[in-house]
Amino acid sequence: MNRIVGVIPSRWGSTRFPGKSLAMISGKPMIQWVVERVKQAKKLDAVIVATDDRRIADCVHGLHIPDVQVAMTRADHPSGTDRIAEAVQGLEIDAVINVQGDEPLIDPLLIDELAGVIASGKWDMATAATPIADPSQIRDPSVVKALFNRHGQALYFSRATIPHIREPEGVSTSGIYWRHIGIYAYRRDYLLQLVAEPPCALENLEKLEQLRALDMGCRMKVIKTQDFGIGVDTPEDIAKAEALLARL
């Protein structure tokens, strides 16, 4: 039987929004929203908040939510993936779900779907993508586009507009462009291999860590989902998150 844990990387020193994990959203710190959503998933054996800051750790401990642990990690990790790897390297588990600490509306059903994919043993990693409905996002470099084949296996991720339509006249873009959602499932052993590898050339060019996995030959499944949620990257995003939460 597969043992799968959900890990939420949560650092204090965000460049655009320092301390955002403890930013209040509709009366609760953001990390509490994330933890509570992740706890609604049914296929996780435990939830771990991986942080470098005692203030975040104290907040999570104060929630007193069963099966939620805190892993204190180094402050100098270059990415959340490296922080997660440190948090799980000594655990006897089979797989890890990486849930971003700034996703207060993450869908528990998506977490369970990713857990099912990675538990199948057919894939090294799994992630998700949602259709791009807003035409302005197609050419927006902050919106990462995902390409995958008929079996859902990832082919490439880019900030560029991919695929390029050579003869666009009369071509509908519906179902062509997919926005990558930054949630990942990893086999534990593959995660440790991934963080041991140096960044590849494409990763350095696009500033997309998942390209390192593809460069390694990763079998990565892309799950199609209609749910996008919202990432809280700046203080201005709090109002957007509160508006979405009010509709639930």
Image: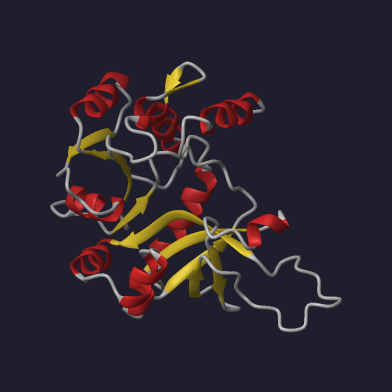
Which one is in front, 38 or 140? Answer: 140
Task: Specify the quadrant of the image occupied by residue 241.
Answer: top right
The residue nearer to you, when weighing 81 against 23, is 23
Does residue 218 appear anywhere in the picture? no
Quadrant of the drawing holding the N terminus:
bottom left
| 242 w.r.t. 141: above or below | above
On the rendered structure, is 219 left or right of 136? left
Q: Is residue 95 above or below residue 227?
A: below
As rendered, which of 93 and 146 lies closer to the eye? 146
Which of the 4 image quarters holds residue 242?
Answer: top right
Q: Position of residue 105 (x, y in %)?
A: 53, 37
Residue at (55%, 74%) from the top-left corner? 148
Furthest toward the right, the residue is: 170
Question: How many numbered tags mark residues here?
Answer: 0
Residue pictured at 23% horizontal, 28% vertical: 57
Where is residue 135 shown, x and y percent of the image?
72, 58
Decide if residue 196 is on the left or right side of residue 178. Answer: left
Identified at 40% across, 25% down, the residue is 23
x and y percentages locating residue 153 in the rendered image: 50, 75
Judge from the rendering whether residue 162 lies leftward or rightward of residue 157; answer left or right.
right
Q: Is residue 142 visible?
A: yes
Residue situated in front as seen by the camera: 86 or 158: 158
Which of the 4 image quarters holds residue 175?
Answer: bottom right
Q: Residue at x 84, y 78 (%)?
A: 169
Indicate the position of residue 28 as horizontal and vertical percent values: 44, 20
Q: Residue furthest top?
A: 27
**Quadrant assignment for the C terminus:** top right
Q: Residue furthest bottom?
A: 166
